[in-house]
Amino acid sequence: MTLIKEKEDMEKEGKMAKFSQIFRKAFNSIYDYIKKFIPNENLRKRVLSSAVLVPIAIYAMFFSINLFFLIALSITIMMTVEWVDIIRSAKNQRKWRLIGFFYVLIPVFCVIKIRLIEPYILLWMFVIIWSTDIFAYFAGKAIGGPKLAPLISPNKTWSGLIGGVLACSLIGLISSLLFSGSALFFIIASFALSIIEQVSDLTESKIKRIFNLKDSGNIIPGHGGIIDRLDGMVLVAPAVLFLITLFPANFFS
């Protein structure tokens, strides 16, 4: 029996090693393929990490409330840890901890509330956030021009802001097909939320500037910390919940 079990264990180990080798080769092939089209290493990391995280987020939104709450809890803990690390050099710890309490709690509460109301609204919100970041980045790189807030975030440009806003206006038009409101309402709402997202992004950049930090952490390759990745959510989530409360007829038939 012992020899048979040892043989089975060896076969399992052999299969696992073979699977690991195949997976590593497949990953390296995909990575090499991406490298040809995205020469910037940091951007490659952003693409790969997003390719992993976005499907998980969408699955949790629509198909698993338990996974969604687990992610929300994990994000709350990680944002709190990062915030404590960001402000460790602050002289007035009480003030900054109080700011951090609301900075983390309010957007997470709003995201959970929106998910319980209607997952499609939450998807619309995150598509606005993601699209603003993506199109602002590429528009800024392609067009360049005057800096948006050079003392806060030297890489952001007015062309990037305009690119993000225009892209989100188009997304607003498409999103109106999902809800009962007019196309004009969702174009204006998406336009406004895109601007709010970039203000939220700049707010986080200002906080990091105060404490002489480049990133809030390094947990996500290419993105920095959790707060870096979700900085747009901080102001956008409350704004979306406000829109739902003020204009419910535009979201529900």
Image (cartoon, rainbow, N blue to C red):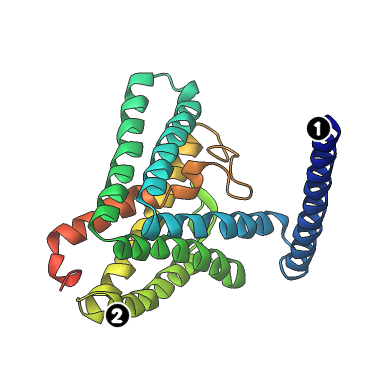
Residue 203 shows up from this direction: no
Q: Amino acid at mark 2?
A: Leu
Tag 1 residue: 1
Residue 70 to residue 186: above or below:
above
Q: Is residue 129 left or right of residue 37?
A: left
Residue 40's x, y, as percent?
72, 60
Residue 16 shows up from this direction: yes
Residue 234's x, y, as percent?
36, 47
Callout 1 touching callout 2 (CB < 8 Å): no
Query: Which residue is rendered at x = 77% and y = 68% of the image?
Result: 33
- Marker disc for residue 251: none
Tag 2 residue: 177
Q: Amino acid at mark 1?
A: Met
Q: Is residue 7 left or right of residue 129?
A: right
State the residue in front, 149 or 65. Answer: 65
Q: Quadrant of the N terminus?
A: top right
Residue 57's x, y, as percent?
46, 55
State the residue in front, 5 or 219. Answer: 5
Label 1 secondary element: loop
Residue 90 to residue 229: above or below:
above
